[in-house]
Image: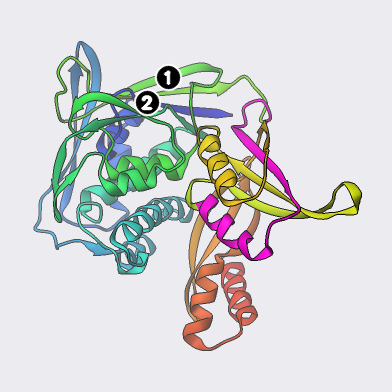
Amino acid sequence: MKIAYFDCFSGISGDMTLGALLACGVETEWLRAELQRLNLPGWRLDVEPTSRNGIGATDVTVAITEEQGHGRHLHHIEEILAKSVISPAIQAKALAVFIKLADAEARIHQTTPDRIHFHEVGAVDAIVDIVGSCLLLEKLGVERVVSSPLPMGRGFVECMHGTIPIPAPATLEMLQGVPVYSVDVEGELVTPTGAAILKTLAAGFGPMPAMTVRASGYGAGKKQFGNRPNLLRVILGDTVEDVFSAAPEVTVLETNLDDFSPQFYEPLSERLFAAGALDVYLAPIQMKKGRPATLVTVLAPPEKAEALADIIFTETTTLGIRFNTMRRLCMEREWRAVETPYGSIRIKIGRWKGEEKTAAPEYEDVRAAAERAGAPLKLVLQAAMNAYSQEQ
């Protein structure tokens, strides 16, 4: 399996991602030709060699050549992708990145993803950055993306909404569950576009996995941060481990409850999910002296385990929690929108070793469409699956 390891020692942005991947061995003209298939006017791709602290790098700029609008909604970006002649797989990956952005922005602005009006992130340069990154990863044959923990700068940055703190709220929202660390740098190291690309496409965050190195490339950032080279390094290699030993770790927390009101399990689960739990589930068990009880199991990123244990101790009657570290295999996931008589519905697709193994309509989309149409859930779900089957 070919791995791309994103070594984000000075953060990540969309143009840095393009530069680093191009420097791994892709011709610039190939990328320009592929991006023209977006049928999106008003831009050009400028690519120049540069260096930072004596390290050769590729500097990419998406130059705007025509006056653009004031941002786009998610459905506008869906239309741009759908009307392009980019491959459906690349469209789906790019759209998943924008959906990740929309979800984060919606939570920050206390609204819904479809009402989010993208400004900087809906601009032409962000669309080119995101689609271009997906194209380059496919061209390089990358099957798995892994990233280092991400450095967080400090200070403030100007955006369409005014002055906001660094990290930007949307960036921080997307990085829930991602290991980050603070560095003494005045400025934005991880942009919303960079965060969305990694959170959507990366299978894990941590040390560089064991690999046989095949290539490396450096993408240059635009700002100077003192002696720190503002570069993103991407390292390409072939795995030397099987999928089980390379799987990311999770912490499993368990506790038995025999004196806890059933009414409180739902708010307990909600608090655990809000604090970063990967999954929460309940199972009936029989304890000593024939007492019926409930086994509460929480799957957590290792860095979230202590905070989740705090919630369990605070919200329940337990006196103890068992925990263990395990590895978890996950399918690669992507979302593809299909049109039905009830509106647009996203299909969640699971891939294993590059092959599609499962597909199912996104429940929240189905529920919302059913409520709008006054139709049974099962009919809306079947319509979505029929539409997806017809596209295959």
The answer to whether mark 2 and mark 1 are in CB contact below 8 A is: yes
350 vs 140, nearest the viewer = 350
In the image, what residue occupies the spot 25% across and 44% down?
Answer: 168
Which residue is the extreme one toward the top? 54
First in sequence: mark 2 vs mark 1: 2
Image spot of residue 89 (x, y percent): 48, 52
The furthest residue to the bottom:
374
Q: Which mark is residue 215?
A: 1
Q: Nearer the viewer, residue 59 or 183?
A: 183
Give the residue number, with chain letter if any, for mark 2.
Answer: 25
* Residue at horizontal 17 percent and vertical 47 percent from the top: 164
Q: Residue at x 51, y 28 (%)?
A: 3
211 sits left or right of 323 in the view: left
For the residue carrying disc 1, how many other residues have a C-alpha within 10 Å: few (<14), some (14-19), or many (20+)? Answer: few
Under mark 2, the amino acid is Gly
In the rendered structure, the answer to whether residue 137 lies left or right of residue 250 reads left
Alpha-carbon distance for marks 2 and 1? 8 Å
Q: Is residue 122 above or below residue 146?
A: below
Relative to residue 392, is residue 9 depicted above or below? above
Task: Look at the image and tell me whether residue 341 can be seen.
Answer: no
Q: Would residue 271 be seen by someone viewing this image from the given angle?
A: yes
Looking at the image, is 87 positioned above or below residue 176? below
Residues packed near mark 2 inside 10 Å, few (<14), some (14 to 19) or many (20 plus) = some
Quarter of the image for residue 200 reads: top left
Is the N terminus in the top left, top right, bottom left or bottom right quadrant?
top right
Q: Which residues are magenta?
A: 244-273
Image location of residue 150, percent across then percent down: 36, 30
Name the quadrant containing residue 332: top right
Residue 307: x and y in percent read 50, 39
Between 382 and 90, which is closer to the camera in this rendering?
A: 382
Mark 1 belongs to which amino acid? Ala
